[in-house]
Image: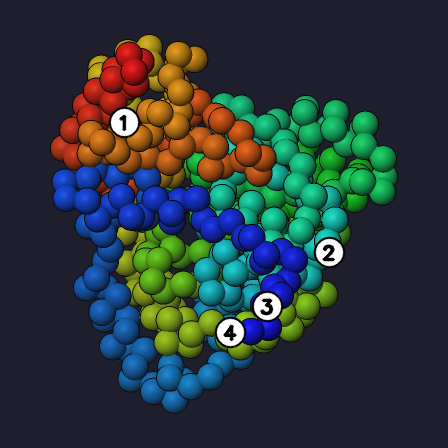
Amino acid sequence: MTSICFASSYTAPAGSPIRELFSYLSRPGMISFAGGYPSPSLFDAEGLREAAQRTLADPAGSLQYGATEGTSALRQAIAKLCETRGIACDAPDILVTTGSQQAFDLLIRIFIERGASVYIETPAYPAAIQALRLAQARIQEIPVDEDGLSVDNLRRQLETTAPADRPKLLYTVPNFSNPSGTLLAAPRRQALVQLALQYGFLIIEDDPYGELSFGEKAPSPIYATGHVLAGKDNPVLYLSSLSKTVAPALRVGWILAPPEILRRCAVAKQTTDLCTSPLAQGIALQYLASGRYEPAVARACAEYGRRMKALAQSLRTETGDGLTFVEPRGGMFLWAACTPLLDASRLFQSAVDNGVVFVPGSAFYPRDLEISAMRLSYATPTVDEIKEGVRRLALAMSQSLFR
């Protein structure tokens, strides 16, 4: 039999480190802090049902193929949604995608060739790392601290890098980031745009969590800052989706970018799915027009804030000095660093044995590192499950120290 020859990037591809944990979730009684899924209890099923019924009243529009760029009506609705976030844009500035993950993938396809340099904040969203690896990009890390991406570190790295090796793109999740839960400070947003203009790279601003704030609103998007500083030469490309605020199953996301970029993304999209489901787009449009979106987001903010407080308090009570963390001001994730005496891989196995699962910190770095940290998602478990899960985690930590 003739041997199979795969493309070089797929000879031994690494899958999603988070999805590889899913086998543990089927174990009876397992409490999971691992997934980044919204809470099913917050899905507005009634509102979505009504939106679906209104959409299906036009079968020709909802069940037929649609424009690659997305329906005009939904693009207009998304432009209005962006306006509430401080972004001035019009429908032609937007391309609807099948989730914001596709938006990122399309940008990688049109910009990145093998060996191209891309900067990414770390710890980082694993699917972004995975996409860049498959594109065979050279991934350069910019560390995150409690105020988000370290612009000072980025500046030093740019100053010491030869022009030919400077990045084409920089990827960041500035609002309540996955996994660290950090919020990029407003002065850093301006400084980041200034560096992009000075050194000639594009910023990919991924914003799925920005509306999930537990207090004051997040600062203006980096895109808005770029518009003020550079106008039509704005170096920021804005990505977002309805996955965390409405429902992941809709798979409705978008890119906000200049026409020459959107046109190339549309060509790339035509070779993957032709268009994002017109049925899903119609449901999203009807839901956004129903008046139910804002109350649903407010409920999510209140509930996730309550669950985050329960997690933070339980960690302090149960683990003492064993874990250090900064309480996130929004989003779905808490990043906790372990005491130096704990071995992260041993702790993970002990946690599984005790019926609780988290994502080890090494999953969020492009290099093969042993990171004594973990991502804990408080979005899906209830408050009672959070308290019991932390009790089990503390027991696992105690056992790991003496093995």
From what the image shows, is residue 272 above or below residue 40? below
Which callout, 2 or 4, points at the residue further toward the start of the chain?
Answer: 2
CA neighbours of label 3 inside 10 A, class few (<14), some (14 to 19), many (20+): few
Q: Residue at x 20, y 29 (%)?
A: 354
Which labelled disc corresponds to residue 41? none
Q: Which residue ends up furthest to the right in the rendered image? A: 163
Residue 217 appears in which quarter of the rendering? top left
Mark found first going from the N terminus, 1 or 3: 3
Quarter of the image with the C terminus is top left
**Nearer-the-camera pick, 293 or 124:** 124
Residue 113 badge: 2
C-beta proximity under 8 Å, tags 3 and 4: no
Whether residue 11 is visible, yes or no, is yes
The part of the image, by quadrant, that contains residue 341 is top left
Vertical position of residue 344 compared to residue 37: above or below: above
Chain-order first, disc 2 or disc 3: 3
Q: Residue furthest bottom?
A: 60
Which label belongs to residue 3?
A: 3
- Is residue 197 in view from this perspective? no
Quadrant (top left/top right/bottom left/bottom right) for the N terminus:
bottom right
Mark 1 belongs to which amino acid?
Answer: Ser
Are the residues flagged by discs 2 and 3 in contact, CB closer than 8 Å? Answer: no
Asked if marks 1 and 3 touch (Cβ < 8 Å), the reply is no
Helix, strand, or loop for circle 2? loop
First in residue order: circle 1 vs circle 4: 4
On screen, residue 323 above or below 277: above
Residue 9 coordinates in the image, percent (x, y): 62, 56
Label 1, on which residue? 350
